[in-house]
Amino acid sequence: EHLAHWRSQAKRELVMLFPSTAAFGLLLSGTPHPPLAVRVRPTMSLDPADWKLLSRRDQVDGALTLAAAEAGTEAQVVTVTIPRSDDAPSLGLLLDEIATSGDAGIVAVEGLVEGGNGEKATAPLLPGDALVAAAEEGKPTTGVSLEGLPFDSVVERLSSLSSAVGVVVSVKRLVRKPRATVTVRFPEAEGREDARMTLYQGANLRRAMLSSGVALNDPLARRFDAGVGTGDCGGEGTCCTCAVEVAKGLDALSEPSSQEVQMVAKRFPRWRLACKATLGPIEQDEEIVLKVQPRNWDGFYRD
């Protein structure tokens, strides 16, 4: 995938004088948008830096795909139906071209026209929702792609749809991912400060700790697969040298396999093999505390 870099464009005002645009109630604002101080789900952001446009090798027509720019957010598709009729043909949406570069761009919802059809959509449209597709209600073959297009192209494609029937609109919405704050603690004899990481669903504990420079493997642990000797199996889940004690947040990790239960959890219920444990599934932020090299902590052999 190729990442295209986008620059913000000075906002333009679109005065609703032309029939093709007046029928949709589209408006671009000329005022800058203050940064959001707090990120919540959804992010409701009009900052182009929060998005990235990707070109996919399987799209020969050069179509672009919108994706979240930050690891802590994801782009979720939301589809709504906006009612329209001959008497009320406007979409009632305030749109903002938040980024453009040549024939590409990002057009997002800035707000809704008070009392307009946008307020009557089957689900709320929120500031920051980026337009990706539209079709006449009940006629999916009329669908048009709006993803990665500049404002003029979006208006042109929306204008091709009948204004006498409802419109099914798909947007991509930036949503904050739940995450886990992980504190990694070391044996007392090492005198090391705790390490801290932020992980998202699906992250593997071993890979995350190694990427953060955490000395994970216990050099004194005997290999489970061989029965004798020590050494690292390289993340295959057969040596038991990457075992960690989960002092807090055990339920936020994936379920252990029967092999992992046999190797560690049967005797030490709060131990996990870091190479096999992943985060999630989680629906809210979690806090996890890990003790690496649990055999080397004071009192282990006395207990």
Image (spheres, rainbow, N blue to C red):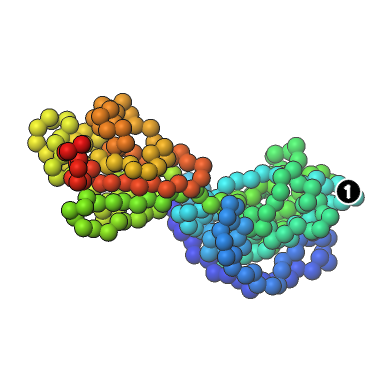
Nearest the viewer among 45 and 221 is: 221
Identify which residue is drawn at 16% across, 38% down. Answer: 301
Q: Position of residue 292 (x, y in %)?
A: 25, 46
**x 86%, y 46%: residue:** 85
Residue sitting nearer the eye, 214 or 23? 214
| Residue designated by label 1 | 86
Q: Quadrant of the C terminus?
A: top left
Tell me the amino acid under the disc marked 1: Asp
Residue 103 place in picture, x, y as percent: 59, 63
Q: Residue 24, image x and y in percent?
A: 79, 56
Left or right for 67, reference 293? right
Tally of marks: 1
- Mark 1 crowdedness (10 Å alpha carbons): few <14, some 14-19, many ≥20: few
Q: Where is residue 144? Give x, y as percent.
A: 67, 48
Location of residue 99 with respect to 265 vertically, above or below: below
Q: Which sits in the foreground, 27 or 60?
A: 27
Q: Does 274 sit left or right of 167 as displayed?
A: left
